[in-house]
Every structure is written in C-alpha cells, then in structure tokens.
C-alpha cells in the first residue's frame, strides 16, 4: 500500500463545506486544490482519503470502493 500525502498551506474548510483535491496540475482556488502530480495516485478498486490536522489528529475519513450506483465522493 502506497501512502501519498498532500499538505495544504493555510486552509480552512468550514463545517458542511467541501474542497476538491485534484491529483494533476491546475490552479488552486478556495474550493479546489491541485497537487501538481504527473501520475495517478488513486486506485480503481478502493482508496481512502483522510483529512488530518497539522498535529496529526484525524478530522475526517472517506473510503471509495466501487464505481456506479452507491458510490461515494469523498
């Protein structure tokens, strides 16, 4: 299992709000952050995204397991 990390600068995501994290290149906005990677890091069969604070405390986690009906956007 590979572990990929993306470290935000000074970012705040309010309760009930969202932020999209893109693997590739792009322009960062208030609701979209781009990692600038040249290769994919997400699997096609399962993955987990975990949001942590700078001190390592887990804030939220979301797992994707299959495409199609019943899928989850994390």
Image (cartoon, grey):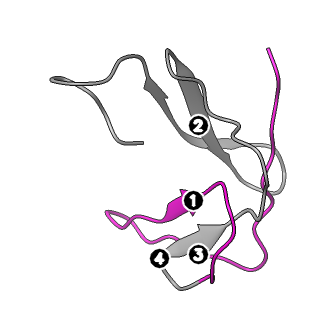
Task: Point out which mark residue 21 bears.
Answer: 1
Mark closer to the observer (4, 3): 4
Mark closer to the observer (1, 2): 1
- Residue 64 at x, y percent in the picture: 43, 25
Q: Are marks 1 and 2 in contact (CB under 8 Å)?
A: yes
Q: Which residue is mark 4?
A: 31
Q: Quadrant of the N terminus?
A: top right
Q: At 74% across and 80% down in the image, what residue appears? A: 10
Q: Which portion, as a residue range, is magenta? A: 1-28
- Pick whichever of labels 2 and 3 is earlier in the sequence: 3
Would you say 43 lies left or right of 45 here?
A: right
Q: Which residue is mark 3?
A: 12
Q: Is residue 19 magenta?
A: yes
- Residue 45 at x, y percent in the picture: 49, 15
- Under circle 2, the secondary element is strand
Q: Are marks 4 and 2 in contact (CB under 8 Å)?
A: no
Q: Main secondary structure of the magenta part?
A: loop
Q: Looking at the picture, does residue 12 appear above or below residue 47?
A: below
Q: At 35% across and 17% down in the image, what residue appears? A: 66
Q: At 44% across and 72% down in the image, what residue appears? A: 14
Q: Quadrant of residue 65?
A: top left
- Under circle 4, the secondary element is loop
- Under circle 3, the secondary element is loop
Question: Within 10 angstroms of label 3, few (less than 14), some, or many (20 or more) residues?
Answer: few
Q: Looking at the picture, does residue 67 appear above or below residue 49?
A: above
């Amino acid at each position: 299992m590979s572990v990929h990390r993306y470290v935000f600068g000074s970012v705040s995501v309010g309760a009930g709000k969202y932020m999209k994290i893109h693997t590739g290149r792009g322009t960062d906005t208030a609701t979209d952050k781009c990692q600038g990677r040249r290769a994919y890091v997400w699997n096609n069969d399962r993955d987990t995204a975990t949001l942590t604070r700078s001190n390592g405390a887990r804030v939220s986690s979301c797992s994707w397991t299959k495409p199609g009906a019943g899928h989850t956007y994390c």
